Image (cartoon, helix red, strand yellow):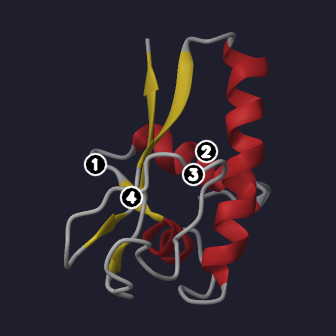
Amino acid sequence: MSLEETVREKILRLLIEAKRPLTAREIAEMVGLDPYRGEAEVYEHLKHIAKTLRRRYGGRAVLYMIPPRCKDCGYVFKDLKEPRKPSRCPRCKSQRIEPPKFYIETE
């Protein structure tokens, strides 16, 4: 990774080159952020990356999110407005939530 790249550019390149969907924690680790504190920063960058892809690639590249899911009851958080890891399941109240995963698909 180049020293001139911003964190957002590193995340964008990482997601384009990734062979599998990545969690925010994995992304933070791979771009050199603290894996726990950097998670929130990654979610913020992902919002902007989605806009950048629409503007820069005109629909030929799209950021996708595999929604978070409860590990206890299987509830899928389909209707999230923005990328984040929910704190607890609305159905069973469990805090064992599988985090969302992200990937970029290009034509």
Q: Measure the alpha-carbon separation of dots 2 and 3.
A: 21 Å
Callout 1 amino acid: Arg
Residue underneath mark 1:
20
Q: Secondary structure at mark 4?
A: strand
Measure the C-alpha gap from mark 4 to mark 2: 12 Å
Nearest to the observer: residue 107 or residue 63: 63
Q: Amino acid at mark 2?
A: Leu
Q: Which residue is mark 3?
A: 80
Other-residue count near label 4 (Cα within 10 Å), few / some / many at <14 / 14–19 / ≥20: some
Q: Is label 3 or label 1 in front?
A: 3
In this rendering, which labeled residue sits more in front, label 2 or label 3? 3
Q: Classify 35 as above or below 91.
A: below
- The tag earlier along the polypeptide, 3 or 4, is 4
In the image: residue 46, left or right of residue 6: left
Q: From the viewer's perspective, is the residue at label 3 or at label 4 nearer?
A: 3
Give the residue type at disc 3: Leu
Read off the residue under disc 4. Answer: 22
Q: Is residue 13 above or below residue 35?
A: above
Q: Earlier in the sequence, mark 2 or mark 1?
A: 2
Q: Which residue is mark 2?
A: 12
Mark 1 residue element: loop
* In-image side of 77 versus 96 (left or right): right
Secondary element type, mark 3: loop
Question: What x and y, as percent, mark residue 33?
Answer: 63, 80
Give me the residue at 56% from left, 89% from top. 36
Q: What whole-number distance in Å separates the C-alpha atoms at marks 3 and 1? A: 22 Å
Residue at x 50% of width, y 50% of height: 14
8 and 45: which is toward the camera: 45
